[in-house]
C-alpha cells in the first residue's frame, strides 16, 4: 500500500484533503502529457515561422536543430518536465528570453484582472441576489432576476466593446486599454483596470446573482430562519445573522467554478484591452509557434484551474463538517 | 464556530489579492512606462517584435521598429523610392559597376559610445554572409569582399555588377553593427540611429529614447524632435482605433480596418494620409498543378474576377490596382491593371477551350481580414463561370507557411507579399507559385547585371511577361493609411522602406 493509498483509505479531514491532493497532482501530470502531445501535432513549424518566406530547406533544418526540435519527442518532454520540476521553464526560441520570468510577469497582470473581476462580480451578486430572494414576489425582486437573466446572455467581450465605446471613446473618462503597473502609478493602474474588471465581472456577477438568489431562497425556507423571524427579527437582519453563512456553501462552489471561467474569459478581455497578461502571451506564442512557451502557459492555466478546484474542495470540508465524512 | 467561515473567506480573498501585488512588486523593474508630455510621441502598431534580432528572426515587425530609428544603413530609400544618403555621405561606382566606394560620415557614433568607421562596414557586411539566417541574407551573396581604405572610406567589391545590391543595402541587411554590440541582439540592440531602445514590456510596448551619441557637434543631421517615442502594440484593429480616439496614442502607423477610416476623416482632430506600400495582395495560382498549369485556365480566372469591385467590397476601395508584381514606387512600374478587363463571357470561353465545363478549386488563404474578405468576393465571381471555390482559411503564418508555402499543397491562395522587389520570386521555380519560365529567369538574371537603363526595361519586360502568362492574379496593392493627431508633422504617406521612419517627425509649432 502506498502512502497515498493509505492516506486515501483513512478517515478524517486530513485524509480527505490528502485524497484531493493526490487527484490534483495526478491531473496535473496527465495535463502536462496532453498539452505536450497537442503541441507536437499542432500544424506549423516553429523554425519555418521564425525564418519566414524565402527560407531555404537547409536553413529551416539548421534552425530546427538549433531549437532542439529534431530530438525525439520523449526527450523533449522529459527535458521540459525536468526543467519545470526544478522551476526552470526554459528559454523561448522565439523571444530568446527565459520563459519563467515572462510567465510570472504576465500572470501578475492576469491575476489582478481576475481578482478585480471577481470582486466586481461579488459586489454585484451578493446584494442583488439577496434583494432578489427576499423580494422574490415583488416587482423589484422580479426585476433584478430578469436583469440577471439578460446579463448572463451578454458575452464579456461585447460588454467590453460597449464600455470602451461609451466611457473611453465618447466620454473620455477612462483609457481604452493598456496597462500601468501599480508600482509605477497607482492611479493610472486603477483607471486602466476599471473597464476590464467591470467587463469581466458583469457577466459573472449576473450568473452569481442567480445562485445567491436561489441559495438565499433555500435558506429562507429553513426552520431556523422561520424561528428567527418568529422571534421578531426583520427579514434582512434575520438573514444576515442566521442565513448567510448557510447560503455561503453553494455560492463558494460556484465561485470556484467561476474563477476558472474568469481565467479563460481574461484571455479575451486582455485582447480587447491590450493588457499584457497570460492570455495575450498565449495568443502571441501560438501565432509564433513558440511551442515551449505555449506548453508552459497552458500548463500553468490548467494547474491554476485544478488548484482552484482543489482549494474549493478543501474549503468545503472546512465550511461544512458533514462533507468530511463522505 | 460562527466566525470561522467569514474569517476563512477573508483570508482567501486576501491571498488572491495579495498574490498579484507580490508578483507586480518583483517585476516592477521590467516595466516600460514613461511619463507623457510634449516631447513624448506614442505610435500604435499591430505587429509586435518577438525579439530585436532581425538577423535571425524574419518578419516585418522588427525592422519596422528599429531600422533607420535605432540601426542605420549606408544608404536609405526615400518615400518616392529613390536611394539617398545614410551613414554614407556619398558613394562612387566604378565604370564596370562592381566597385562601390562609400564615403562615411566622420561623426556618427554607436549608442555604446564607439565611433562608426569603415571597419564596422566590413564587419557588418561579412556578418550578414556568415551569421545571418533569414533568407534576405542572400542579397549579400554578390559581395566578393569589403576593404577598409581609410577610417571613413569603405570599398565594397562585387563579384559581378548588380543593380539590386545597392537597393538591398537600404533594407535591414544594410544595417550597420558595432563588433562590441552584437552579443545580445535579441534584447539589446546597439546602433548609430537617433534612438536607442530604453525598455520594453512584452505584449504592450517598446520605448525608444533619444540616443545621446547621435547628432554630435558638426553633424548636419538634426536631433529628433521627440525625445521619447513609445511604440504601442495592439493585436486588435478596433483596440488600435480606440486608442487614438481616446487619446491613448498620437499616431496609427497603418490602419488595418478600412471601414474605420471615414470616422477619422470626419474628425477634425486628426489627419489621414493615404499612400502606397510594397504589399501586393496576390491571388496565387498553383502553376505546377492541374488544372492551373494551363495558361488558359489561369487567364479565364483572371478575366472572371472584377478587381475593381473586389477592392471596393473587400477593402473599401482603398488601395491601388496594379496588374503585376510591381508597386508604383519601383522605378520599373507600369500600370498593367487594364490587361484583364472583367469579362465573364470570355472567361467561360477560355475554360471551355481548356476542356472544362465546370471546376472545383480550393482557396487556401491566410486567416487575415484582407484575405478573408477578398476570398468571398472571388468565390462569388468565379461561381458565375462555373468554378466552385472552397475557401479554407489557414492560421497565418504557421499553418499557411507549412501547407501552402513549403508543401505547395493548394490550388489558389491569397496572401500579401510585403518584401521590396519580390518580383524576383517568380524567377525561382521552387517558390510556391510553381512558376517555371525560362524567359523570366533569363530576364531577371540579365537585368541585375545590365547597365541601369536596360535594367529598367528588362524588369518591365519581366512584369509584362508575368501578366501575359497570368502567373498570378494581383488583386490590389495594399494601401498605407496613417492617421495622426493634427500636431504631428513629417509623416510619410508611402511606406517604401521596411522602417517606420521616426527621424523626420516633429511637433507642429516646434522649430
Image: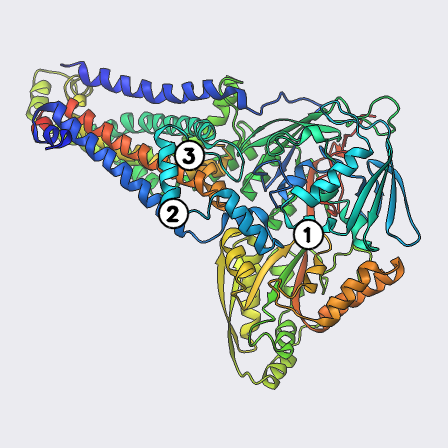
Q: Quadrant of residue A317?
A: top left
Q: Which residue is mark 3?
A: A199
Foreground pick, B280 / B169: B169
In the image, residue A188 sits, relative to residue A305, either above or below, namely above
Residue A144: x and y in percent read 29, 34
Residue A24: x and y in percent read 23, 33
Give the mark nearer the N terminus: 2 vs 3. 2
Q: Is residue A221 left or right of residue A127?
A: left
Q: Mark 1, residues whose alpha carbon is within 10 Å: few (<14), some, or many (≥20)?
A: some
Residue mark closest to the camera, 3 vs 1: 1
Residue A277: x and y in percent read 46, 32
Quadrant location of the N terminus of chain A?
top left
Local SS, label 3: helix
Q: Chain of mark 3?
A: A
Q: Which residue is mark 2?
A: A73
In the image, residue B460 sits, relative to residue A161, either above or below, namely below
Amino acid at each position: 500500500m502506498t502512502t497515498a493509498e493509505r492516506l486515501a483509505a483513512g478517515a478524517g479531514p486530513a485524509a480527505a484533503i490528502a485524497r484531493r491532493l493526490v487527484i490534483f497532482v495526478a491531473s496535473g501530470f496527465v495535463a502536462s502529457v496532453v498539452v505536450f502531445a497537442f503541441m507536437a501535432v499542432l500544424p506549423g513549424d516553429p523554425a519555418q515561422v521564425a525564418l519566414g518566406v524565402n527560407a531555404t530547406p537547409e536553413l529551416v533544418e539548421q534552425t530546427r536543430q538549433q531549437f532542439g526540435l529534431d530530438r525525439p519527442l520523449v526527450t523533449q518532454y522529459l527535458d521540459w518536465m525536468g526543467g519545470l520540476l526544478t522551476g526552470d521553464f526554459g528559454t523561448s526560441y522565439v523571444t530568446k528570453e527565459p520563459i519563467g520570468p515572462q510567465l510570472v510577469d504576465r500572470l501578475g497582470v492576469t491575476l489582478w484582472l481576475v481578482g478585480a473581476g471577481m470582486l466586481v462580480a461579488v459586489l454585484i451578486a451578493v446584494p442583488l441576489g439577496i434583494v432578489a430572494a427576499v423580494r422574490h414576489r415583488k416587482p423589484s425582486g422580479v426585476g433584478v432576476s430578469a436583469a440577471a437573466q439578460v446579463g448572463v446572455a451578454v458575452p464579456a467581450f461585447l460588454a467590453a466593446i460597449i464600455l470602451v465605446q461609451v466611457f473611453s471613446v465618447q466620454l473620455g473618462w477612462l483609457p481604452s486599454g493598456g496597462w500601468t503597473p501599480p508600482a509605477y502609478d497607482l492611479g493610472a493602474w486603477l483607471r486602466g483596470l476599471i473597464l476590464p474588471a467591470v467587463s469581466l465581472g458583469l457577466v459573472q456577477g449576473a450568473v452569481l446573482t442567480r445562485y445567491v438568489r436561489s441559495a438565499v431562497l433555500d435558506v429562507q425556507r429553513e426552520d431556523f430562519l422561520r424561528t428567527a423571524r418568529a422571534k421578531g427579527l426583520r427579514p434582512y437582519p434575520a438573514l444576515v445573522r442566521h442565513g448567510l453563512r448557510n447560503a455561503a456553501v453553494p455560492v463558494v462552489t460556484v465561485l470556484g467554478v467561476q474563477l476558472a471561467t474568469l481565467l479563460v474569459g481574461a484571455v479575451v478581455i486582455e485582447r480587447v484591452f491590450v493588457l499584457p497578461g497570460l492570455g495575450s502571451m498565449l495568443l502571441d506564442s501560438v501565432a509564433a509557434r513558440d511551442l515551449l512557451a505555449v506548453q508552459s502557459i497552458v500548463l500553468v492555466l490548467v494547474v491554476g484551474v485544478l488548484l482552484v478546484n482543489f482549494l474549493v474542495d478543501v474549503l468545503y470540508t472546512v465550511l461544512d463538517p458533514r462533507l468530511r465524512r463522505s | 464556530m460562527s466566525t470561522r467561515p467569514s474569517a476563512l473567506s477573508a483570508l482567501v480573498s486576501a491571498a488572491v489579492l495579495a498574490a498579484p501585488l507580490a508578483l507586480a512588486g518583483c517585476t516592477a523593474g521590467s516595466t516600460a512606462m514613461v511619463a507623457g508630455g510634449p516631447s513624448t510621441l506614442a505610435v500604435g502598431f499591430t505587429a509586435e517584435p518577438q525579439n530585436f534580432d532581425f538577423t535571425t528572426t524574419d518578419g516585418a515587425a522588427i525592422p519596422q521598429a528599429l531600422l533607420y530609428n535605432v540601426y542605420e544603413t549606408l544608404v536609405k530609400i526615400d518615400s518616392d523610392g529613390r536611394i539617398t544618403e545614410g551613414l554614407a555621405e556619398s558613394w562612387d561606382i566604378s565604370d564596370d559597376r562592381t566597385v562601390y566606394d562609400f564615403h562615411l560620415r566622420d561623426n556618427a557614433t554607436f549608442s555604446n559610445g564607439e565611433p562608426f568607421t569603415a571597419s564596422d562596414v566590413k564587419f557588418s557586411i561579412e556578418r550578414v554572409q556568415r551569421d545571418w539566417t533569414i533568407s534576405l541574407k542572400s542579397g549579400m551573396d554578390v559581395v566578393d569582399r569589403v576593404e577598409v581604405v581609410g577610417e571613413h572610406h569603405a570599398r565594397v567589391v562585387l563579384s559581378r555588377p548588380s543593380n539590386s545590391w545597392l537597393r538591398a543595402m537600404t533594407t535591414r541587411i544594410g544595417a550597420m553593427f558595432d563588433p562590441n554590440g552584437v552579443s545580445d541582439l535579441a534584447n539589446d540592440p546597439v546602433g548609430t540611429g537617433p534612438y536607442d531602445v530604453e525598455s520594453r514590456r512584452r505584449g504592450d510596448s517598446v520605448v525608444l529614447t533619444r540616443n545621446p551619441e547621435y547628432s554630435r557637434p558638426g553633424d548636419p543631421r538634426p536631433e529628433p524632435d521627440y525625445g521619447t517615442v513609445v511604440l504601442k502594440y495592439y493585436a486588435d484593429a478596433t483596440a488600435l482605433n480606440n486608442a487614438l480616439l481616446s487619446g491613448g496614442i498620437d499616431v496609427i502607423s497603418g490602419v488595418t480596418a478600412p471601414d474605420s477610416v471615414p470616422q477619422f476623416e470626419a474628425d477634425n482632430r486628426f489627419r489621414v494620409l493615404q499612400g502606397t506600400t510594397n504589399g501586393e495582395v496576390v491571388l496565387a495560382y498553383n502553376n505546377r498543378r492541374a488544372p492551373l498549369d494551363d495558361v488558359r485556365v489561369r487567364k479565364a480566372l483572371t478575366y472572371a474576377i472584377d478587381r475593381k469591385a473586389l477592392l471596393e467590397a473587400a477593402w473599401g476601395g482603398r488601395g491601388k490596382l496594379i496588374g503585376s508584381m510591381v508597386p508604383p514606387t519601383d522605378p520599373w512600374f507600369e500600370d498593367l491593371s487594364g490587361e484583364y478587363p472583367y469579362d465573364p463571357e470570355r472567361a467561360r470561353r477560355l475554360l471551355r477551350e481548356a476542356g472544362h465545363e465546370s471546376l472545383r478549386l480550393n482557396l487556401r488563404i491566410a486567416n487575415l481580414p484582407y484575405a478573408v474578405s477578398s476570398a468571398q468576393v472571388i468565390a462569388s465571381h468565379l461561381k458565375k463561370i462555373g468554378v466552385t471555390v472552397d475557401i479554407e482559411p489557414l492560421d497565418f503564418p504557421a499553418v499557411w507557411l507549412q501547407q501552402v508555402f513549403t508543401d505547395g499543397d493548394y490550388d489558389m491562395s491569397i496572401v500579401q507579399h510585403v518584401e521590396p522587389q519580390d518580383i524576383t520570386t517568380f524567377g525561382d521555380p521552387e517558390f510556391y507559385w510553381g512558376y517555371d519560365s525560362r524567359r523570366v529567369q533569363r530576364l531577371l538574371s540579365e537585368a541585375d547585371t545590365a547597365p541601369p537603363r536596360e535594367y529598367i526595361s528588362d524588369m518591365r519586360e519581366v512584369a509584362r511577361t508575368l501578366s501575359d502568362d497570368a502567373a498570378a492574379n494581383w488583386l490590389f496593392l495594399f494601401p498605407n493609411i496613417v492617421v495622426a493627431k493634427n500636431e504631428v508633422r513629417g509623416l510619410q504617406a508611402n511606406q517604401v522602406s521596411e522602417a517606420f521612419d521616426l527621424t523626420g517627425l516633429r511637433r507642429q509649432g516646434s522649430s
